Amino acid sequence: MNFRLTNTILIIVIGLIALTQTNAAPYIYNVYDFGATGNGKTLDSPAIQKAIDTCTANGGGEVLLPAGVFLSGALVLKDHVTLHISEGAVLLGSKNIGDYKEFRPSIPSYNDSFLKYSLIYAENATNIALIGKGKIDGQGGSFEVKTKKKPDRYMNRPYIIRLVACKNVRVEDLTLTNSAMWMQHYFACEDVYIRGLNVYNHCNKNNDMIDIDGCKNVVVSNCIGDTDDDAMTIKSTSGIVSENITITNCVLSSHCNAIKCGTESHAGFRNITISNCVVKPSAHPTKIYGHPTGISGITLGLVDGGVMNGVTISNIRIDGTLVPIYLRLGDRGRIYKEGMERPPVGQYRNVRISNVVATGADTLGCSITGLPGHPVENIHLSDISITFKGGGTVADAQVNVPELPAHYPESTMFGKLPAYGFYVRHAKNISMQNINLTFENEDQRPALVCDDVHGMNINGFYAQGVPKTPELIRLVDSKDVFITNSRPLNEVGLFLNVEGESSERIGVLNNDLRLAGEEVNLSKNVDQDEVLVR
C-alpha cells in the first residue's frame, strides 16, 4: 500500500476516535445547553447547577457562561469543575434570599452561628476553579442589615464566594462587585491560587475584599481591590492556623485596613510574605465604616490567642491612611465554639517590615504594643520613610496610654499617642534601621517613645523635631537599648530622654548630634552608670 495513503488513513482513524471520545465526554458544558436564558430576569441557577453536576459526574471539565446576564441563587461548585465566566458574561446574584441555600461548614469556626448564605459555595471539593474575564455582581445593596444586635445583623447577607476545606483552588481574572458581606471567604483550604482579580465592594457593611482564613499554601497576585471594609485580610476564625501564604503585586484601597492579619486570631498566622503592593485612598466618595482615606496601611493583630510567627512585609507604598503601621498583641480571648475555654494570651514574634514609603499619615502615630508580661518579640523594621500630618502638643507628649487588653484591635484605639512616629511598649528584641520620620505641621511630641522595651537596636534613625520638643527619643524603663548612626533632621532641644529606675545598659554611640541643644537627659531615678554616650 502507498505510504502516503497509509498515513492518511491512520490520521483519519485517529481523528475519528478523538471525535468519538469528545462527543462522549465533552470538556465544555455551555449553560445555554442546559436551559439557561442569560436574560438577567429568569432565575438561571437551576440550569447552571445542572451543568456543574453533569460536568463533575462525567469526570470534570469546564462549565461555560457565554455572553449574557445570568440571574442566580446559590451554586455549589464540585470536584474537577472550572466555572468559566467569559468576557461579556455577568453572574448576577439574586435579590431574593429565598434563592439561596443555607451552608453550615463541618469545621467549627467563629462564623458558624451567623453566616450561612453564599452565591458560590464549595466544601471538600478538589481541583476547582473560577475563571474568566466576566463579572460577578452580588447586588448586595439589596440585603438590609435588619438589626444591630449580634449575631442577627449578619444573618440575611450572602457572601459571593465561600470555599471550605477545598484543595487545589484557582480563582483568576474576574471582576467581583457588590457583595452583601465579605466578597470572598477561603476557609481551611489548601493549595489556593488567586490571580488578576478586580474587586469593588462598597454596597453594604462588612464589605471585605478577600478573607483567607485557616488556609495553607496560598498565592495571591496581581489583584486590584477597592473596598469599604478591610481589603487584603488574613484571619483565623477556628483552630486552624493560616500559614504559608504569599501576597504580591496588588493595588489596595480600603476605608478600613488595607493589609490586615486579624481580627480573629484563634490559631494565628505563620509563614506569611506580603510584597510589592500599593495602598491608596478609595475612589468611593462615601464610607460605611472606617475613614475616607483608610484607617491603616498595615495591621497585624493577635488578640484571641494563637501565634504570629514569621511574617515578612516588604516594598509597600502607602498613601493617606490614618496609621501606616500597627502591630498589636492583645487579650480579647474570644472563643469560636460553645464550651471551649478562653484562650490564653498568644505568642507574637518574628515580624519583619521593610522598604515602606508612607505619606499623608494622620496625627495619631504608629504603634507596636504587647501586654505586661507578654511582649511582642523579634520585630525588625528597616528602610521605612513616613510623613505625618503633625500638630501634636507638649501635653500630647505626656499622655498616659491605657493598656486596653480586650479592646478590638484597631490602630486608632489608643487615640493620639505620645510619639508622632512610633510608640513601642512591652516589647523584646526590637530593631529599627534606616528609619526616616517627618511631619507636615510642627509636632512637639517625640518621634519615638519606648516603654518597657528589653533589647533594642536603633541604627540610622533620622527624625524631624522642633527646638522646643521635650526630646526626639524617649526611653522609659527599657534595657539593652543601643542608638547608633542616628541624627535629628533639624534643630531639636534634646536628642534622648531616659526615664525610669529600670532603665539599664543604654548606649548612645557614633551619632551626629550637632543639631541637638542637649544630647542626653537622665531622670533622677536613672543610674548614670547605666547610660554610655560616645
Image (cartoon, grey):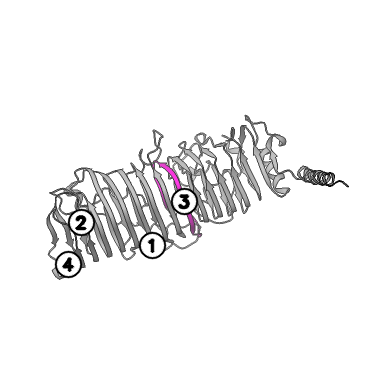
Q: Dot 4: few (<14), some (14–19), or many (≥20) neighbours within 10 Å?
A: some
Disc 4 on helix, strand or loop?
A: strand
Spot occupied by residue 69 in the image (x, y as percentages of width and height): 61, 31
Q: Which is nearer the eye, 257 or 128? A: 128
Q: Which is nearer the eye, 417 or 196? A: 196
Q: Earlier in the sequence, mark 4 or mark 1?
A: 1
Q: Dot 3: few (<14), some (14–19), or many (≥20) neighbours within 10 Å?
A: many
- Are discs 3 and 4 less than 8 Å apart at CB? no
Q: Disc 1 designates what residue?
A: 350
Disc 3 on helix, strand or loop?
A: strand
- Are discs 4 and 1 less than 8 Å apart at CB? no
Q: Disc 2 and disc 1: Cα gap in Å?
A: 24 Å
Q: Which is nearer the eye, 249 or 446? A: 249
In the image, the segment drawn in magenta is: 234-261
Q: Disc 2 designates what residue?
A: 473
Instruction: Check the picture and name the quadrant holding the C terminus.
Output: bottom left
Residue at 52%, 41% in the rendered image: 157
Q: Earlier in the sequence, mark 3 or mark 4?
A: 3
Residue, far bottom? 529
Amino acid carrying mark 1 in the image: Asn
